[in-house]
Amino acid sequence: MEIMHPLGRSIEGWLRSQIHGEGHREGLGEGGGPPRGLTIALSREVGAGGTTVAREIGSRLGWPVYDQELVEQISRAMNVRPQWLEELDERRSSWLEECFEAFARVPTLRENVYCRHLIETLFDLAARGNCVIVGRGAAQVLPASTTLRVRLLATLEDRVRVMGRELNLSPDEAASWIATRDRERIRFVKDHFRQDPSDPQGYDLVVNTSRFAAGECAELVIRALEAMEIRVGRKASAKAAV
């Protein structure tokens, strides 16, 4: 079933208009001028250290990181209490299904409204650039021309160890929890953005955090960002010379 935008268009059609429309071209460098700044969209497997790596990148670059902060920003835009979204995110439950089951009595918490605010928030952040966005389909939604799309993964053994320690779960419980949450994240992106976040072809850089420490992962991402900045700068210079 196609999800409808509150204004009567499908989310998919609205998203396409945002990517190609005039509203965001200036900020994203698609209207002939240079981009204001690149964005790092960091997708991650559960337990692969996505938040830790994102914070390390942000600290080294002096960039803001939007992980839980993204949920808080959306809650303000939706004019709902932050804990209504925070509690769901903390439980790592299905973002949409349980949200609308648990809070169906709240008029503003509707799937199409949530998706609209999510996408608008992602594009607003990308228009400013110079930020790190963790998950939430950012790597699949934002334009590849101005977004460094990174995927973090790790061995199941390491992920079970990390989540077992964090959530005080047995190895079997942690493995089951990871499988469920991974499945929910993949379903969320597939259902709403029609892409598979586990497909490596959708990323510019894939890093195995079982092989590299958080600081090393951050350095790899920053080096990729520097290479992308050079390439984007060359393209902008070539356009200006025409």
Image (spheres, rainbow, N blue to C red):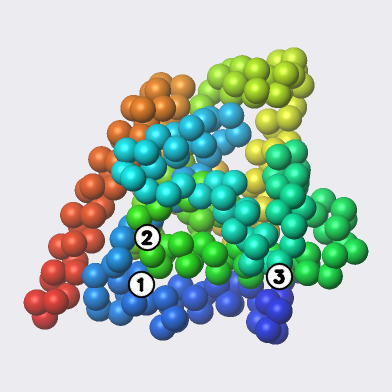
Instruction: Give, as a three-letter code, the residue at label 1.
Output: Gly
**148 with respect to 75 (left or right):** left
If the image is split into quadrants, where does the N terminus sit?
Answer: bottom right
Instruction: Check disc 1: other Cα within 10 Å, few if <14, some if 14-19, many if 20+.
Output: many
In the displayed structure, 169 sits above or below 230; it is above
Residue at image coords 77%, 53%: 84
Asked if the residues shown at circle 1 and circle 2 are in contact, with their CB atoms under 8 angstroms apart, the answer is yes
Quadrant where the image shows the C terminus: bottom left
Q: Residue at x 30, y 66 (%)?
A: 36
156 relative to 29, above or below: above
Sequence-earlier tag: 3 or 2: 3
**Residue 92 point in image, percent of width and height:** 71, 40
Disc 3 and disc 2 in contact, CB within 8 angstroms: no
**Residue 51 spot, x, y in % from top left:** 52, 37
Label 3, residues with CA under 10 Å away: few <14, some 14-19, many ≥20: some
* Residue placed under numbered mark 1 in the picture: 27
190 lies above or below 170: below
Q: CA distance from mark 1 to mark 3?
A: 24 Å
Q: Kindly report the distance in space between the C-alpha atoms of the residues bearing marks 1 and 2.
A: 8 Å
Could you tell whether 35 is left or right of 205 in the image?
left
- Quick check: 113 left or right of 236? right
Q: Secondary structure at mark 1?
A: helix
Residue flagged by tag 3: what amino acid is it? Val
Disc nearer the start of the sequence (1/3): 1
Q: Which residue is mark 3?
A: 113
Instruction: Identify residue for label 2.
Output: 129
First reached walking from the N terminus: tag 1 or tag 2: 1
Which numbered dot is residue 10? none
**Amino acid marked by disc 2:** Gly
Where disc 2 sits, the SS reads loop
